[in-house]
Image (cartoon, helix red, strand yellow):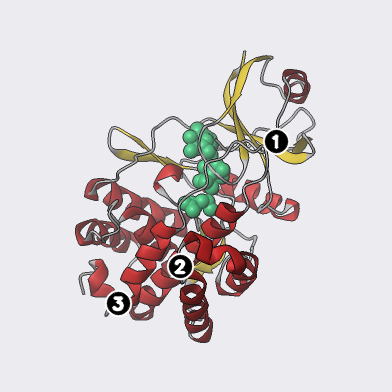
Amino acid sequence: MAVYTDVSAAEMADFIARYDIGTLTSFHGIAEGVENSNFLVQTTGGTFILTLYEKRVARGDLPFFIGLMQHLAARGLSCPQPVERRDGTVLGELGGRPAAMVTFLPGVSVRRPTAHHCAELGAGLARLHLAGADFTMERANTLSVAGWRPLFDVARDGADTVAPGLADTIAQELAALEGDWPKGLPSGIIHADLFPDNAFFLDEALSGIIDFYFACTDAFAYDVAICLNAWCFEADGSYNVTKGRALLSSYGALRPLSAVEVAALPRLARGAALRFLLTRLVDWLNVPAGALVKPKDPLEYLKKLRFHQQVAGAEDYGLIP
Ligand SMILES: Nc1ncnc2c1ncn2[C@@H]1O[C@H](COP(=O)(O)OP(=O)(O)OP(=O)(O)O)[C@@H](O)[C@H]1O
Ligand SMILES: N[C@@H](CCO)C(=O)O
């Protein structure tokens, strides 16, 4: 469970009183997620999600995330909507953290996506990229290549306690990617964390996307590479090319990848694997005392990285030329 910040019933009731959503009937911490503290809140006016923004979310970025969710919803994408307080603002403070209430999105996330789910997701990702085209705010990706070395610096000393030789493997991979990271690719708004737990389905159709707190301005193909990592591997670490083909072809039907994006895909996939290996490693080595959180396995991403390192070209991901 990701609840880093405890909230008492009295604090919660006080907080809710600033909204026009009735009175608090119940709330509890949500048993998923690793980044922020999330609470399911029930009031006489409905069901809501209250998020307390934790370490990786900078307060100054919140207007970008809130504005983006509003923009995407206005373009027809199903995503949580920030709820306004009586004074017209959407950002508050609770337990010493910035906090916002968003609408509850119906649907369930899938633990083991099928090729069908991957196809749905690919189309949803393309729709997200297209819907973000006229969003005017920008946010640099703090977890792209320039952000990885600082993470490694934090985790280097503990890395070999997680797997022998891990520090050397990461050092080599980092140097290789820093030296040759794709530049100048078609860019815009990307989600940057569209994992299966952030996509909801109803009757096997993608019904909504949540958790925009890594969204940023970066290469669209990097977002595709993140999704190949998150959706198209099996539990044993093998890549499922049928799922990859499903994801890539439904994405490409709405937003075809250009030749430069196709050429960059293997390197972007390596970078995406390294990004999640590093953030998971940092979290694995630094679970805050008293936090209710189950850190995610960094080694899952080491296996994925090894796959990408031996890929010859984008066709190995299932891309049909
Ligand atoms: N708007 C919403 N509607 C319904 N459920 C939600 C909503 N927002 C969050 N949740 C639930 O809360 C869980 C955690 O939310 P979220 O993924 O935003 O947290 P996180 O800590 O940022 O997680 P992550 O590890 O994916 O970054 C989700 O898996 C989902 O079950
Ligand atoms: N989706 C991420 C957690 C949020 O950064 C992971 O699975 O490592």
Question: Furthest-bottom residue in view?
Answer: 179
**Residue 41 appears in the figure:** no
Q: Give the labeled residue for mark 3.
A: 310
Whole-percent x and y of residue 15? 76, 26
At label 3, the amino acid type is Gln
Asked if the beta carbon under badge 1 is closer than 8 A to the nearest atom of ligand 1, the reply is: no
Q: Are marks 3 and 1 in contact (CB under 8 Å)?
A: no
Residue 130: horizontal and vertical position, in percent?
A: 44, 59
Q: Amino acid at mark 2?
A: Pro
Is residue 147 among the parts visible in the rendering? yes
Secondary structure beneath label 2: loop
Q: Does residue 1 sit above or below 65 in this rendering?
A: above
221 or 1: nearer the viewer = 1
Front in this rendered view, residue 93 or 258: 93
Label 3 packing within 10 angstroms: few (<14), some (14-19), many (20+) = few
Up the image or down, 315 lies above or below 279; here it is: below
Residue topped by disc 2: 164
Rendered residue at 47%/78% (across/down): 173
- Which of the marked residues, 3 or 1, is nearer the chain's N terminus? 1
> Mark 1 is on which residue type?
Thr
CA neighbours of label 1 inside 10 A, class few (<14), some (14 to 19), many (20+) = some
Mark 1 element type? loop
How far, Cα to Cα, is label 3 from label 1? 42 Å
Residue 62 in the image: x percent, y percent?
69, 50
**Image marks 1 and 2: residues in contact by CB distance under 8 Å:** no
Q: Residue visible at 66% across and 38% down?
A: 4
Q: Earlier in the sequence, mark 3 or mark 2?
A: 2
Say left or right for 209 vs 154.
left
What residue does disc 1 label? 5
Circle 2 Cα neighbour tier, 10 Å, few/some/many (<14 / 14–19 / ≥20): few
| Left or right position of 49 against 311 | right
